[in-house]
Each structure stands twice: as C-alpha cells, then as structure tokens.
Image: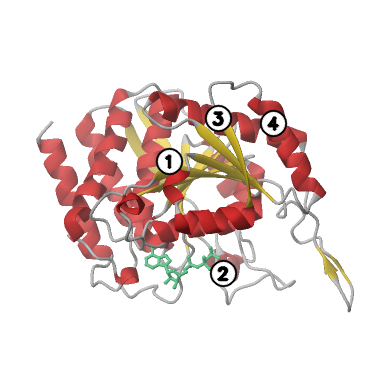
Amino acid sequence: MTQDNSKLTIAVFAGDGIGPEVTAPCVELLTELTKSLGGPTLEFEALAAGAGHYQATGEALPQTSLDRAAEADAILLGAMGDPDVRYPDGTEIVPQIDLRDYFELYAGVRPVTTQPGMPVPLADPRGQELDFVIIRESTEGLFAHRGEAEETDDSSTDRLTITRAACERLFDFSFELARSRKARGGSGIVTCVDKANVLQSMGFFRRMFDERAAQYPDIERRYMYADAAALALVKQPWVFDVMVMENLLGDILSDLGAGLMGGLGMAPSADIGPGHAVFQPCHGTAPDIAGSGKANPTAMFLSGAMMLDWLGERHDSPQLREGAEIFRSAVDTAFRDGALKPTELGGSDGLEAITARVRAEMQAALAAR
Ligand code: ATP
C-alpha cells in the first residue's frame, strides 16, 4: 500500500474478451473524475494475466503481476478466461479465483440495486427499486479443493469445506454491513442462505452464523434454504437486505441477482480481504460479443465506484467518497426513464453509447459542484 495518500496506485488486470473493452473507459472515467475532485490521484498500472497471457507464455498469473498487485492500493479487474483455452486437466483459466485465494478475499460483495426507469425484468414497482447485497464466501466452500477431485473411471468426487475461521470473518463482515446499511435507512436483516437441511457442512455454516449473530443483537437474523431463496429472489426480492452464503451458492444466486438488475452487464462486485480488494464486474469475458462493441460497461463502472468508496474509507478521503457518489449517480441518471437500453436487453446501446452518456452525466455533475 502506498504511504503517500495523495497518489494511490491501482493494479489493473484488464484480462480477456470484453475485459479490456470495459476496463479502458472505466479507467478513463476514474482518471477524469478523481483529477477534477482534487483529492488523491489514481495511477493505473496494467498487469499481465489471463487466458491470452497463458496462451502466449504458459503462465496464467505471473508472480511478478501478483507482487505488483500486492503493492497496489486496490485492484481493478475486467474479466479473465476463454472457454477455448484450458489447462491440461481441461479446466478453464481463472486467475480471478487464484487472486481470491492469494489475497484471502473472503467476502464477495454483490450489490443488487436498481433505479426506476432502469430496464429490469420485474414488472412489480418494488422490483424496480431493489437495494440488497449478496455476500458470497469466496475462499472455500465447494471451490476450496478445485482441481483435487478424487476421480476414477466411474466417479468423480469434489469436497466442500467450511471452516470456523472463514465463517467468523464472513459473518462479522455481513453483520457489520447490515449495521452500516441500517444506519442509512436499511432494514438491518442478515439472511443466512444454505442447505443445512441436507448437508452437514452447511449445518456447521448455520451454527457459525448463529454464534456470530449473538454479537449483533441490533441486527435481525433470518434463514433460508438456497432453493427457497432462489424462488424468493424471483418472486419478492425486495424482502432482502444482506444475504450471506457459501461460495458456489453465491456464484449461482449472484447471477440471479444480476438478472434482476437487467443482466450481467449491470452487476458490479467487490472481493474484499483483510488487506486487499479486487473490484470487477460480475460478468465473464463474454467471447460471443467480444470485439462487436456490444459490451455493456455499466457493471465495470459501478465496480469502479465501489473501489472509490472502499479507498475513500481506507484513506479517509471525502473526495474519493464523493467521487463514488458522483460516478454512481451518473450511471443512474444516464439510465433514467429508459434513456439507455443495452444490447443485452434487446436495445441498441453498446459500449460507446453507454460510456458517452455516463461521461456526459459525470461531467455535468462535476460542473454543478
Ligand atoms: P464466466 O464463467 O467467466 O463467469 P459466464 O459463463 O458467466 O462467464 P459471461 O462471459 O459472463 O458468461 O457471459 C454470459 C452471457 O452474458 C453472454 O451471452 C454474454 O454475451 C452476456 N454478457 C456478459 N457480460 C456482458 C456485458 N458486459 N454486456 C453485454 N452482455 C454481456
């Protein structure tokens, strides 16, 4: 981490497919924004990793990139991987998962927020004003032993691991988040999502949840089995405040959350650890649209805003916090009243149109300060 608070370094893994396409305008907008605000300036350092890099060098995530990322104040990531480029065992190149392990990024934060006028699938007006957060445990669960399946000709067995240490920090993070949301008008509820009715490991997860919940008497605790949670997310997602779950469940249900926001191109995320954090859109590299100009950069922009928030807290910078607010509002205003309809929702607005509109709204907000 930089000692000099006037200049912060951001490690950038643009990655593969549409990763570099959505990362470039995000870096431009973040640069323009932070320069205008007069607080800390951001210096971006491009780092190599991903499927393309693996193809070229035989390495998916070089140690030099990891070392540079470790030194940085935050990590911004586009998307990495390519279904056609695989390790010899047939699995995909996923350095983003390796980063979670390396930096112990235990809390995958997936906000599901919509604004009236945004192109969302739920017709109910309450579905157009969603504001809840999915917390996905991101270092263990069913991903803990990936690549180590016990496999014979007749079967393949993966293992699911839940540890006390990971649970404690995960649940503390979730209850603290609910508490800070409650201070800003949130309902102060954490829902533990699991399959405790079937899997012993998930029963342990729930017991750990109860243990930590005892420390937060001001926050209501609720429980829901994952299948029921999937149904509720479609039928009445507005009942949720903070949801917390195991890695694979979070992987799946956060894509459902992205769907409620209008698509993967709308959904941001942050992976937070004790000393580092990675900010990236929920989507993958979308090879089907790479190079076509159809990529929606909104998820990347909102991830950039989450990064400003996080940096603003860590470095106690009102300018960075204001920057996060301006960036988010610029996105909201750009989409208001159906002004933009991304191609993934059947509209005709792609990378350039969405970027231009968000930039214009951002510049107007800066001019009006
Ligand atoms: P991964 O396994 O790497 O997470 P994925 O299987 O979830 O990836 P994505 O690459 O995210 O797949 O793409 C899923 C679908 O969503 C594709 O049809 C893609 O075109 C679309 N999509 C994803 N991101 C965007 C975006 N930013 N803009 C427009 N469409 C997108």
Q: Which dot, 3 or 2, sits closer to the camera?
A: 3
CA gap between label 1 and label 3 equals 37 Å
- Say whether disc 2 or disc 1 marks the residue closer to the N-terminus: 1
Provide the residue designation for mark 3. 220
- Say whether disc 4 or disc 1 marks the residue closer to the N-terminus: 1
CA gap between label 3 and label 2 equals 51 Å
Residue 312 vs residue 144: left or right? left
CA gap between label 4 and label 1 equals 37 Å
Provide the residue designation for mark 2. 56
Q: Quarter holding the C terminus?
A: top left
Q: Residue at x 55, y 36 (%)?
A: 190
- 60 shown above or below 322: below
Kindly tell me whether residue 313 is visible in this rendering: yes
Q: Are marks 2 and 1 in contact (CB under 8 Å)?
A: no
The amino acid on which the numbered mark 4 sits, given as a three-letter code, is Asp
Q: Which dot, 1 or 3, sits closer to the camera?
A: 3
Ligand 1 neighbours mark 1 (CB distance < 8 Å): no
Ligand 1 neighbours mark 3 (CB distance < 8 Å): no
The part of the image, by quadrant, that contains residue 145 is bottom right
The amino acid on which the numbered mark 1 sits, given as a three-letter code, is Ile
Provide the residue designation for mark 4. 210
Mark number, residue 10:
1
On the image, the x and y values in percent for residue 90 come to 70, 73
Q: Which dot, 4 or 1, sits closer to the camera?
A: 4
Mark 2 secondary-structure assignment: helix
